[in-house]
Amino acid sequence: MSQYRDMFVSEAREYLQSLNRSLLELEKCPSELSVLQEIFRSAHTLKGMSASMGFKDMETLTHRMENLLDRLRNGQLTADSGLVNVLFECLDTLESMTDDIEAGENGSVDISSISEKIDGFVVCEQTPEDTAIDQSGEEAIAVAATPADSQDQQAPAGSNEYEVHVTIEKSSDFRGIRAFLVIQNLSEIGSIITTTPSIQDLEDEKFSYDFSLVIQTDKSIDDVERKAKGVAEISQVKVKTRAVEKKEAAQKPAVKEGVKNIHSVRIDIDRLDVIMNLVGELVISRGRLFQIGSKHGLIDLNETLTMVDRSITDLQNEIMRIRMLPVDHVFNRFPRIVRDISKKQGKDINFIIEGQDTELDRTVLDEISDPLNHLIRNAVDHGIEMPEERVAKGKSATGTVKLVARRERSNVIIEVEDDGKGIDVNRVKQKAIDRGLLTEAQAAAMGDDEALMLIFKPGLSTAEKLSEVSGRGVGMDIVKTKVESLGGTVKIDSKPGEGTKTILKLPPTIAIVQALLIKVGDEHYAVSITNVVESEYVTESDIKTISGKEVIVIRDTLMPLIRLDRLFDIGTNDHMEKRTVIVIEKGDEKIGLLVDFIESQQEIFVKPLSGLLQNIRGFEGVTIMGDGRVVPILDISTLVEVKK
């Protein structure tokens, strides 16, 4: 079954995410039956999938979960904190098994400890139904599919017999398991009388892409159809009543014959990366062709290129859209983290998530996961006070942590906010002085906003004691480093006693960006427009020197100046009367880059540096222009550090 392993892992993770969300809901609303049903369905499906793949430990654990959940549904148990904790431990164990399976193993994990905890709740003797569940997945289906007469079962009064015809998508590589899951789903609402082909043939995939079965149930046609369609990669389900087929046909329009079109396919992310690189090459070639057409006055070529340009732009937009994913793919793991930390520390926290549908490029989303994890842990660990401390301050005993995402122009803003104790600026300054990062005089002259940014210095932490929860005193430098490596910025706003807000400003993608192409002497560079605030013509007399460092005043704002010609040791035209200063923003600080002039603004494809060049500070990559020139792309964050 190794050919199905990747698909199994992908779908198992989806059900585990569903379990995680539902368990968090169950903890808030222990008596909500619909939540219990959703948890039971996820565990039941995982049991069937693992049984089909031969992962016995996962099958055993999910079966034990079913027994526990069944008693919850029947009112024999209540979802108190102890029971919910055991269910969360089951979830963690299942995730470990899935990781093991993804690594090519068979998911074998020691489940004796968690099994004993489950058995501590399941005090009732096993019922005959439990015994049936104890059989392997294949045997359970065989029992469910045995004709009702041979099981000495009588149909309940008013029950119906339906003939169900199921068609599986032709793109499916998993049709045997799809059939298994359909039968499992339907057996929850009735008795399976017969299947065509036989159960064994379905298991052995000795059928094309459709099969039929007869079910006896007191549910409606819509209920049966909905239950059968609750399995992935099912393209069509037809249900009709056996006894009153003509009447049913008269009441309901005939279902259109034929297989429905496939509306989605699974694509490996590596293939999307390859396509993205090819689109980048097309963007480069497009620029080259435009230059050739303009240089030689080729009218026919320019007219054709206008159409090609539109097609490449549309292709570029589509591939960018395909790579975009909702931030919920990362956000959905944080409710569990907040829940676990707050329980461990005895804090009561209301965790609010907004803007889950905001989209980011898959690469950006992957890279931002760890910084957000660090910020959330910091908010819960350092930010929110203990309940008695909050009450003494006149606050609610329940703290609030918010995680918000939104679009702002061409960027994505992510905010992590808490209503905790805030950051003591004077304490931050003192820590910086103790570590030799500031002098007493510098600290006294430093404003509060600038002092707050010291939090991002390596090793600077204001925590009274180091904690494994929020980073062991590493500080927030990893957050700043990671965000700036993506072309983003970090800001922090805090008021003592009221709380802290950390704001991440991120580009939606890092592959193709808008950039300014600048010239310094005979050299060309590119600067991502995300970092650019404005540009201004200046003369040499506009540049001043304070404490041995060059500065410039633009719109009443004093800012340090970096001469790129001196930084890179480039010869420049000393006779130029006017040069250009590009004002860039780095956190709360504005910096001026002195260049000869701005050539143009255009879209560029970022090629990261690799090999011996990948750790060079001041550059985030290169781009290739239409005429074949290789142009370095400046990395503003490390460029400023190099200058210092």
Image: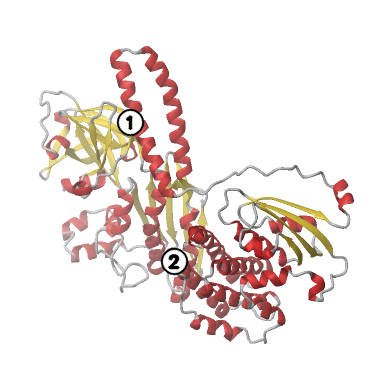
Q: Residue at x 17, y 47 (%)?
A: 642
Q: Decide: is 389 above or below 159.
A: below
Q: Which of the 4 image quadrants contains residue 256?
A: top right
State how far apart marks 1 and 2 are (Cα). 40 Å
Q: Residue at x 43, y 49 (%)?
A: 269
Where is residue 201? Give x, y as percent.
65, 62
Instruction: Work out whether residue 10 or residue 507 is closer to the camera in this orientation and state it.
Output: 10
Q: Residue at x 46, y 56 (%)?
A: 330
Instruction: Work out whether residue 184 or residue 157 is closer to the camera in this orientation and state it.
Output: 184
**Residue labelled with disc 2:** 99
- Secondary structure state at the residue bearing disc 1: helix
| Amino acid tagged 2 | Asp
- Secondary structure state at the residue bearing disc 2: helix
**Residue labelled with disc 1:** 284
Q: Would residue 181 be visible to someone looking at this image?
A: no
| Amino acid tagged 1 | Ile
Q: Decide: is 77 above or below 485.
A: below
Instruction: Work out whether residue 607 or residue 56 is closer to the camera in this orientation and state it.
Output: 56
Where is residue 452? Give x, y as percent.
30, 57
In the figure, is residue 373 to the left or right of 523?
right
Q: Earlier in the sequence, mark 1 or mark 2?
A: 2
Where is residue 13? Give x, y as percent.
51, 62
Q: Which of the 4 image quadrants contains residue 190?
A: bottom right
Please tell me how crowded label 2 is: few (under 14), some (14-19), or many (20+) other residues with Cα within 10 Å.
some
Where is residue 406? Give x, y as percent.
47, 47
In the figure, is residue 61 to the left or right of 70?
left
Q: How is the image coloured?
A: secondary structure
Q: How many marks?
A: 2
